Image: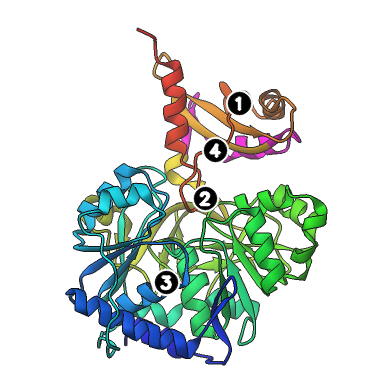
């Protein structure tokens, strides 16, 4: 069962475009021919079955063909973001042991690191698909690195058989189009922007360069997708655009959000601006496929959703454990973390959840983000939600930082919406909280540091304040 062959055949094969980028439309037949030739090109390079191939490329038709071609040839496709730090690239180069990399000319910093193994993919004769079994490695994802170096997550060909359960819940099928702003180098983008559309006969609209509000609105107006898959940060940026530019969004039926927590405030602002409902989607690099989603008509900004049929979940002391057909077996090269989070076919997400009376799961935060202040446990997200209630605050993130006595205290970082004093507004909003939950420090930043998937890099905020507090001299 070759994953590439499986999704190209599709469960619901249809005619028309499989992938669209700008003015270029690539139908399923043409894509299949290009993929087989790309597989032949990899074989001509000397790429062996099971060997990793790094793909640091724009989110383009060329990346789609190269990724599927590598899997078709039996290699391990490793799409990597073009926006990583040099240290992360050097780590991935060493960690993967790759001999070959395809690197777009536009990613100058990446080319410096991968210059010794950067190659051009030669035109090859069409290659028959590699005969893989369900557990043969097919592709690798590098985790987003919110707390440190990215970790390698290896997935097998069986992952292709369970992609796109969100599509099924939304009723997406042949003739529909979707637009996914996340890149193929991340599970969210790879599943919903490439593999699930192919499997379901849905057209995927690609934005090759890093998307901003303007390019998303242009693509929505031009291609009229039935569903938009994006992240809360992008949805915030979209509704910051002039109201007259948002008209095309009213023709989109479904808006799906993943990568970070939604908030009731954003859900309300989105509904007021577009008339649409933001639906929460939850997944992780380790399961590859999304695990749960808020069903249409039930979103309140708090509910994460209900599990998809293929996902088994359980709570241990509030921590979510997941078992899924696409679950990776381990992290590569980090045995201690593998032992801590992978157990008997289950994965410990380290995310804290509760279930409400209707059976919906509600994300509370990360178990490794809990901090004890004055002998009492505090969720940093409580401060963030309090700060976001202030009209002057655009975004908020809270971290624990040691003070001069070595005791943990809370630091709140906010971005300003307009010219108002966001720091003062955030501090006043937090005055309603118990004293031990109020921040010791409030800082305004131009933007919150994020991973390429949109997740806040809290460790960088902590480092920022620690540098400020460090005694001079």
Residue topped by disc 3: 62
- Between discs 1 and 2, the one toward the N terminus: 1
Q: Residues within 10 Å of mark 2 (few under 14, many from 20)?
A: many
Say whether disc 4 or disc 1 marks the residue closer to the N-terminus.
1
Label 1 crowd (10 A; few <14 / some 14-19 / many >=20): many
Alpha-carbon distance for marks 1 and 3? 50 Å
| Labels 3 and 2: the sequence-earlier one | 3
Q: Is residue 356 visible?
A: no
Tell me the SS state at disc 1: loop
> Which residue is identified by label 4?
448
Camera-side mark, 1 or 2: 2
Give how far across and how far down residue 319 sits, in percent.
45, 53
Name the mark nearer the viewer: 4 or 3. Answer: 3
Write the start and end of the magenta stretch as one range. 370-393
Q: Residue at x 69, y 61 (%)?
A: 217
Label 1, on which residue?
Answer: 438
């Amino acid at each position: 069962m070759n994953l590439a062959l499986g999704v190209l055949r599709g469960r619901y094969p249809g005619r028309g475009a499989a992938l669209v980028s700008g003015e270029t439309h690539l139908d399923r037949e043409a894509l299949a021919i290009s993929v087989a030739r790309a597989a032949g090109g990899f074989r001509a390079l000397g790429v062996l079955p099971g060997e990793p191939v790094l793909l640091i490329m724009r989110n383009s038709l060329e990346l789609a063909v190269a990724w599927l071609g590598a899997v078709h040839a039996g290699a391990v496709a490793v799409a990597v973001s073009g926006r990583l730090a040099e240290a992360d690239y050097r780590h991935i180069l060493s960690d993967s042991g790759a001999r070959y990399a395809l690197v777009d000319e536009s990613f100058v910093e990446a080319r410096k690191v991968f210059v010794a193994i950067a190659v051009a993919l030669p035109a090859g004769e069409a290659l028959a698909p590699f005969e893989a079994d369900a557990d043969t490695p097919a592709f690798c994802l590098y985790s987003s690195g919110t707390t440190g170096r990215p970790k390698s997550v290896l997935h097998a060909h069986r992952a292709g058989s369970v992609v796109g359960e969100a599509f099924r819940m939304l009723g997406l099928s042949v003739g529909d189009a979707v637009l996914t702003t996340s890149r193929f180098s991340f599970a969210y983008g790879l599943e919903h922007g490439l593999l699930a559309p192919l499997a379901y006969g849905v057209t995927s609209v690609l934005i090759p360069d890093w998307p901003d509000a303007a390019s998303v609105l242009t693509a929505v107006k031009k291609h009229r997708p039935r569903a938009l898959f994006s992240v809360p940060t992008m949805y915030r940026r979209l509704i910051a655009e002039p109201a007259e530019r948002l008209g095309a969004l009213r023709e989109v039926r479904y808006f799906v959000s993943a990568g970070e927590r939604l908030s009731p405030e954003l859900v309300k602002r989105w509904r007021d601006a577009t008339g649409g409902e933001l639906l929460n989607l939850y997944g992780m690099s380790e399961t590859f496929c999304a695990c749960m989603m808020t069903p249409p008509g039930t979103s309140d900004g708090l509910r994460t959703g209900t599990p998809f049929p293929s996902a088994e979940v359980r709570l241990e002391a509030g921590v979510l454990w997941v078992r899924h057909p696409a679950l990776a077996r381990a992290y590569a090269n980090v045995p201690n973390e593998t032992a801590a989070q992978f157990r008997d076919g289950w994965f410990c997400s380290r995310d804290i959840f509760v279930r409400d009376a209707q059976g919906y799961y509600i994300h509370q935060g990360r178990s490794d983000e809990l901090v004890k202040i004055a002998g009492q446990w505090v969720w940093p997200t409580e401060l963030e939600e309090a700060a976001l209630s202030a009209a002057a605050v655009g975004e908020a993130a809270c971290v624990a930082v040691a003070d001069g006595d070595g005791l943990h205290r809370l630091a709140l970082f906010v971005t300003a919406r307009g010219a108002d004093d966001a720091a003062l507004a955030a501090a006043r909003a937090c005055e309603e909280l118990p004293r031990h939950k109020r921040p010791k420090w409030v800082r305004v930043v131009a933007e919150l540091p994020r991973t390429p998937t949109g997740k806040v890099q809290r460790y960088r905020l902590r480092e920022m304040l620690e540098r400020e507090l460090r005694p001079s001299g």
